[in-house]
Amino acid sequence: MRKLFDIQRKFRFTVYVLLSVSIGLVGLSGYIFTLSLKMTDQSRQKIYVLDNGKSLLVALREDISENRDAEARDHVKRFHELFFTLEPDKEYIENNIREALYLADRSAMVQYQSFKENNVYNQVIASDISMTVETDSVKLNFSAYPYRFSYFGKQKIVRTSNITIRKLQTTGQLRNISRTDHNPHGFLIESWRIVDNTDLETIRRKSF
C-alpha cells in the first residue's frame, strides 16, 4: 500500500513538473512570437540602401518625406547647374547637356535645340565665354502631383571685356520615376520653360 502511494506521489510530481515545463515553454513561445512580430514591424520601417556596392545604409521610412523634399530641390538645382554651366570647350558643353537631359523630358531638349540653332554654344566656344549659375531658391508644391516647382537664380556670363549678371527664373513640374545611375533622385522634370532671363547688370572688366 505504501509502495502504491509512493508511485502515485511520484506520478503527480512528474505531472506537475511536465505541466510547469509546458506552461513555461508556452510562455517563452509567446514571448518569442511577440518579439518576432515587433522586430518584423521595425524592419518594415527601414529601407536598406546599397551605397556604391560597398556599405549598407539604413534610412527610416519616417524620414522619407523630408528627404524627398530635399532630393527634389537638389534635382532641380542640379539640372540648372548642368544646363547653364558652360565653358569654351565643346566636349565639356556636350557632357553637361547630356547629363542634364537625363533629368528632364522633351521640354529641355527643345530649349537645348533652340540655343543650338541660335549659335549660343558656338559663340561660347568662339568668344571664350564662361557661364555659371547660382541658385537663389527652389519653390516646390507637394500638395498636387506632378509637383510644380519654380526656380530662381542668377546667371553669370564672363566675357573677355565684361561680366554680365542675368536673372534666371524657370518653371516646370516633377514626376516620380525609377532611380538610375544617371538619375539618382528618381525625378523627371516636365513642361520646363524659362520665364525670365533678362540682364541685371554688366560690369566692365579691367584690361591690363
Image (tube, grey):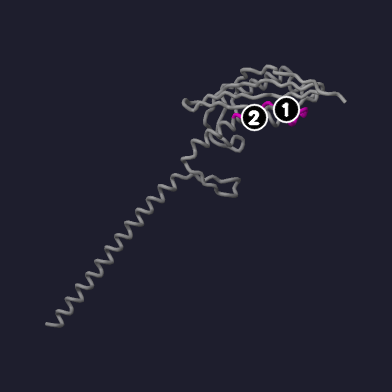
For badge 2, the amino acid type reads Ala
Which element is circle 1 on?
Answer: loop
For badge 1, the amino acid type reads Leu
Nearer the observer, disc 2 or disc 1? 1
Q: Residue at x 49, y 40 (%)?
A: 63
- Residue 196 or residue 82, whichever sits in front: 196
Q: Is residue 118 left or right of residue 3?
A: right
Say which quadrant the N terminus sits in. Answer: bottom left
Q: Is residue 205 left or right of residue 112?
A: right
Q: Residue at x 46, y 40 (%)?
A: 62
Magenta stretch holds residue 81: yes
Q: Residues within 10 Å of mark 1 (few under 14, many from 20)?
A: many
Q: Quadrant of residue 138?
A: top right
Lower sequence index among marks 2 and 1:
1
Per the model, the C-alpha gap separating discs 2 and 1 is 12 Å
Mark 2 lies on residue: 100
Residue furthest out toward the left: 1
Magenta stretch holds residue 121: no
Q: Residues within 10 Å of mark 2 (few under 14, many from 20)?
A: many
Q: Which residues are magenta?
A: 76-92
- Measured from the top left, where is residue 9 in percent x and y? 18, 76
Seen in the picture, residue 58 relative to 177 is either above or below; the reply is below
**Contact (Cβ within 8 Å) of mark 2 with mark 1:** no
Is the stretch drawn in magenta largely helix, strand or loop?
helix
Q: Is residue 164 left or right of residue 12?
A: right
Which label number is shown at residue 86? Answer: 1
Q: Would residue 76 be visible to someone looking at this image?
A: yes
The tally of labels here is 2
- Measured from the top left, where is residue 23 in percent x and y? 27, 63
